[in-house]
Image (cartoon, grey):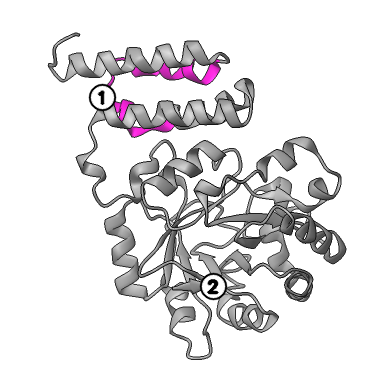
Amino acid sequence: MKIGTIDFGERPLFLAPMEDVTDIGFRKMCRRFGAAMVYTEFVSADAIIRSIKSTLSKMVIDDSERPVGIQIYGKDVPSMVEAAKIVEQVHPDVIDINFGCPVKKVASKGAGSGMLKNIPLLLEITREVVKAVNVPVTVKTRLGWDHDNLVITDLAEQLQDCGIQALTIHGRTRAQMYTGEADWTLIGEVKENPRIHIPIIGNGDVTSVEEADEKFGRYGVDAVMIGRATFGCPWIFSRSSAELTLDEKIDVLEEMLRINVERIDEYRGILHTRRHLAASPVFKGVPDFKQTRIAMLRCTRMDELMAMLEECRERLRKSAGEDDK
């Protein structure tokens, strides 16, 4: 599978762009464990144009995490075009347009999946962004606004005609938000359409490499994008993740913390990382972890958070019957 000149090989797995989740430390770990491409947190076109510091910081890319995409969202042509030109100067490997975010603060303003209620504008934005930049432009969207408006089969062809070089489809409508089960049937129909020649990337409810393999085999998609199942679990992309010990997994989480504090700052680096720590399946075996989890989510100092991680390590060793060394 290729996007532009980037060859991802067969059956690649991508890390989905997620606000307050896909920080630089996490992206680097996901790449280390086999993610074929990662994405920054999605960024607002208006905030990019206004040079909002916190937004610009989300666009910082390290060469060791490439290939990496930057995803932008907005609700009008001029701001999206201007934002795309600014983003291009950061030299991402891909610029992705978000027509899929279902959260109210985005969709209610006509951006993200809200654009599914205005297909002509959605297509105009896509055409103009493609014309404005030289980097490959891709799109991520949903099946439609609701089950009475499942537009993706026609929309995929229209987006391809706009010049995008890949399309990611999340198998839900906007109305579903993240509830129910993702429906991959229409994703498969898009892929089977003989008029579609761009890569189709499937997304929704994939929680393991094995499940991704099932989607590849059943629906024929070119790539699978994994989102929420990656929280606190960057090794999910590895086919040999079962070989990692609990100690090694905690080492990975600690390295994520160090990278984020170094690359961002102590406060925001911890803010990003502690969400992964609280969600990580690694700590499910820690006795009485609930109170520790609460403490992690409140922690604002790196030394304190590292001490909590080491305490969890020791408690896991004891619960597993290891010697307390």
Query: Are there few (<14), some (14-19), or many (20+) residues within 10 Å of tag 2?
Result: few
Which mark identifies residue 116?
none
Q: Residue at x 52, y 31 (%)?
A: 259
Report the side of 7 relative to 111 (left or right): left
As for residue 130 lying within the magenta part, the answer is no
The answer to whether 96 is drawn above or below residue 231 in the figure is below
Q: Position of residue 32 (x, y in %)?
A: 39, 46
Residue type, numbered disc 1: Gly
* Residue 291 in sight here: no
* Majority secondary structure in the magenta region: helix
Label 2 or label 1, whichever comes before in sequence order: 2
- Magenta range is 279-299
Q: Residue at x 43, y 73 (%)?
A: 1
Label 2: which residue? 5
As for residue 283 lying within the magenta part, the answer is yes
Q: Quadrant of residue 112?
A: bottom right
Which mark identifies residue 285?
1
